[in-house]
Amino acid sequence: MRVRIFTYSHVLHPPMTISHLPTQGKLDENKIIVQQHLSAVEFLSVAYPILQKHEASSNIVLAHALSHSPADFVLTECRFIDTVKVPPPSNAIPVGAENFWLTVWTSTRSATPVLQLVLACITSSAGNAYPIFLWGEPTLAPENIGDAVATFLRGCVLDATRVFSVFGPTSLVDAFSRSWTALTGFRQREEPLYDAFFASCSLQTLRSGSGIIDGVRKATHSDAEMVGELVEGFFNDSGYVVDASQAKAEAVDLITKGLVWVYETETREIASFCAVTRTSLRVAAITRVYTFPEWRRRGFAYDLVREVVHRLFEFGKQRVVLYVGKENNARHVYERVGFDVKDDGYDWKEIGFEEVAIRHW
């Protein structure tokens, strides 16, 4: 197993983590350890126990890593990783790569290193670059971790413009973006590309309805044209302009993988679609929901999302998650379904950088 490790020493407040809180009033010399993992298997072999423990909030990195892993690893070996394995600290040079993961740890002389942050720099199955994804406990990671991560990441990406945007818990994104701007000169755009709440629904919070919704069904290839129009509308409404051919290509890919449900009206017209594109053992994420303007305010999106969530629970998932824009009226639809929309500071943000082209994901 090849693991690249970078160390960054600094005097800071002792790390606060999920299981280790600092002793009040004490300072200790901590070492920040950055590890580079050149494959999903390497990454999961180190981080899977912690990601699984926080499977809902870590979906943005865990589900993608699973999708980049061989099926036999996901179905067998991955399930039996139950101990966090941290290689001994050593100095190493970042390796330029297209797909990689960084894990960031804090270590003291007297304590086992603790995972503070995960960074994913990956591409989709179609070869399109995703934003830089961050995950960690947003209020607990030491602030100066941003400097260590930015410095190491710059050595991993072949071109600094690869970091066209960053998505993750707001406090982590803000800390990283300040460090990235100072390091590269690329300034953060004034307005976030996406400013969202994290929402979660369980079987206990799912609100009961009137039963199976007749209009909800899995999309088929005969729906590709209409689903493509819905995909195009979704991205254009989100501020990312895509053309009809790009939208249809994504629709065909989603339908082929069985990731799309549609709401069909009594007149056999497709009014809404819902895509579920990130899944792990117990958690699924709804990532696309859109209704044609002429079919809005009729409850179709509510019926579609509620039915999709219900079916996901029937398929064995224990939690369904999504992100909803703070100014998006769909928040009320999700709350009616049973999603707990976090409005307590645990929010997520995507920011872009000036002079770097925005890309959709």
Image (cartoon, rainbow, N blue to C red):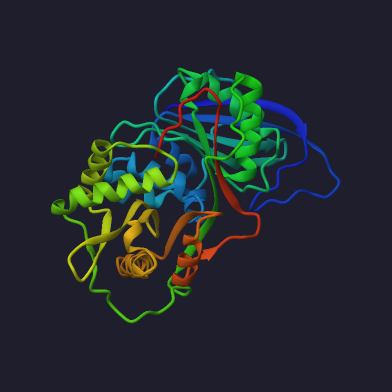
Looking at the image, which residue sits at the far right? 25
Looking at the image, which residue sits at the far front? 294
Visible in this render: residue 79? yes
Rendered location of residue 296, percent (x, y)? 37, 63
Rendered location of residue 112, percent (x, y)? 64, 41
> Residue at the spot x=76%, y=48% of the render?
22
- Which quadrant of the rendered structure holds the C terminus? top left
Lateral position of residue 327 relative to residue 316, left or right: right
Lateral position of residue 248 relative to residue 343, left or right: left
Visible in this render: residue 55? no
Does residue 169 lie above or below 218 as drawn? above
Q: Nearer the viewer, residue 351 or 329?
A: 329
Q: Nearer the viewer, residue 99 or 227?
A: 227
Does residue 305 lie above or below 3 as drawn? below
Rendered location of residue 143, percent (x, y)? 70, 37
The mark tally for this picture is 0
Looking at the image, which residue sits at the far left? 222
Does residue 126 lie above or below 181 as drawn? below
Rendered location of residue 214, percent (x, y)? 23, 73
Q: Quadrant of residue 192?
A: top right
Q: Quadrant of residue 103?
A: top right
Lateral position of residue 151 relative to residue 215, left or right: right
- Which quadrant of the rendered structure holds the N terminus? top left
> Residue at the spot x=65%, y=53% of the render?
19
Q: Nearer the viewer, residue 317 or 321?
A: 321
Q: Quadrant of residue 61?
A: top left
> Residue at the spot x=34%, y=54% of the render?
276
